[in-house]
Amino acid sequence: MKVLKFVLLIVGVVLIIFGLYNAFVPQQVLNIGPLEVNAKEGLTNQTLGMIGIGVLALLAGALIKDRR
């Protein structure tokens, strides 16, 4: 159970950090002649999902009790 708890805590923290990074770090725009590629900025459904799943994994890892 200690391994599962540790993995859930690490995965939760990584997902939260990656979701916040994608939400608040500006994305680059690619311009090649008449072709322009834009990236979405801000909170999207994908970033909110990553943050939400990260919070759930973090809570699950914190609430798992060790067997004695």
Image (cartoon, grey):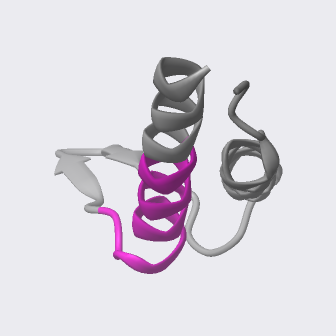
Please state, as top left, top right, bottom left or bottom right, where the N terminus lies in the image.
top right
* Position of 19 relative to 35 (above/below): below
Q: Residue at x 46, y 35 (%)?
A: 6
Residue 14 inside the magenta-drawn segment: yes
Q: Is residue 53 left or right of residue 6?
A: right
Q: Is residue 55 above or below residue 46?
A: below
Magenta span: helix, strand or loop, mainly?
helix
Q: How many marks?
A: 0
**Horizontal relation, residue 29 to residue 6: left or right:** left
Residues 11 and 31: in front is: 11
- Find the magenta span and give its range: 12-27
In the image, what residue occupies the spot 40% across and 45% down? 37
Looking at this view, is 1 or 45 the one in front? 1
Q: Is residue 27 left or right of residue 48?
A: left
> Which quadrant of the view contains residue 4?
top right
Rendering coords of residue 68 (x, y %): 70, 27
**Residue 44 placement (x, y as % from top left):** 75, 59
- Whether residue 39 is visible here, answered yes or no, is no
Identify the residue shown where x is 53% and y is 45%: 9
Q: Position of residue 25 (x, y in %)?
A: 35, 75
Residue 28 seen from this side: yes
Left of 32 or right of it: where is 43? right
Residue at image position (26%, 62%) is 28
Q: Which of the pair 65/43 is nearer the observer? A: 65
In the rendered view, tell whether residue 61 sits above or below residue 41: above
Residue 26 painted magenta? yes
